Image: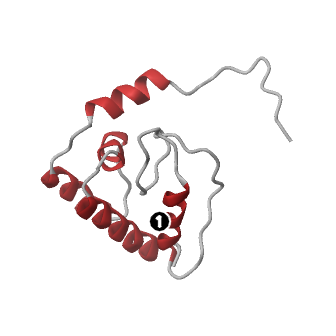
Amino acid sequence: MKLDTTGLDNFIDEKAIWGIVNQNADASTGRVQEILDKALEAKGLTLEETACLLQTEDPELNEAILETAGKVKQAIYGKRVVLFALSTLQTNVVTAVHIADSRTLTLNSFAELSILLK
């Protein structure tokens, strides 16, 4: 079933989102670690911090992101399985998985996401 969106305004400011993404590319290892330390407090991250994490390409840092996400999930939800409605996720959606160069969540990323649900 497709919703009729005729007459509705698009409230997502793609230009602003891509501005944040582009301004936070190539974060240093130290910056990523600072963000992960803050994430462990389970009080949320800013859009800028999230943009840094989403663009991390270093395999060790990606592993650290997944490990931190698992700890935060455990602290907040415990052993409960928590599912969110997933469709095509663009980079403006906050998630702690590796996003492909196409900026779309890949099938491999769904496998990575399943790690967080264990």
Q: Is residue 39 visible?
A: yes
Q: Farthest residue toward the top?
A: 7
Return the residue at label 1.
112
Q: Farthest residue toward the right?
A: 1
Q: Farthest residue toward the bottom?
A: 79
Q: Which residue is drawn at the image coordinates 83% and 28% (left, top)?
A: 4
Out of 3 and 55, give the one closest to the viewer.
55
Left/right placement of residue 61 relative to residue 21 reads left
Q: Which residue is drawn at the image coordinates 27% and 60% (left, top)?
A: 59
Q: Amino acid at mark 1?
A: Glu
Q: Is residue 79 above or below residue 51?
A: below
Measuring from the top left, give residue 32's x and y in whole percent: 22, 53
Q: Is residue 4 above or below residue 76?
A: above
Left/right placement of residue 102 relative to residue 67 reads right
Rate crowding at label 1 as few (under 14), some (14 to 19) or many (20 or more) other CA atoms within 10 Å: some
Dot 1: element:
helix
Q: Which residue is drawn at the image coordinates 42% and 75% (left, top)?
A: 75
Measuring from the top left, give residue 25's x and y in whole percent: 26, 37
Measuring from the top left, give residue 114's x and y in whole percent: 53, 70
In the rendered image, which quarter is residue 66 located in? Answer: bottom left
Measuring from the top left, give residue 70's x and y in whole percent: 41, 72
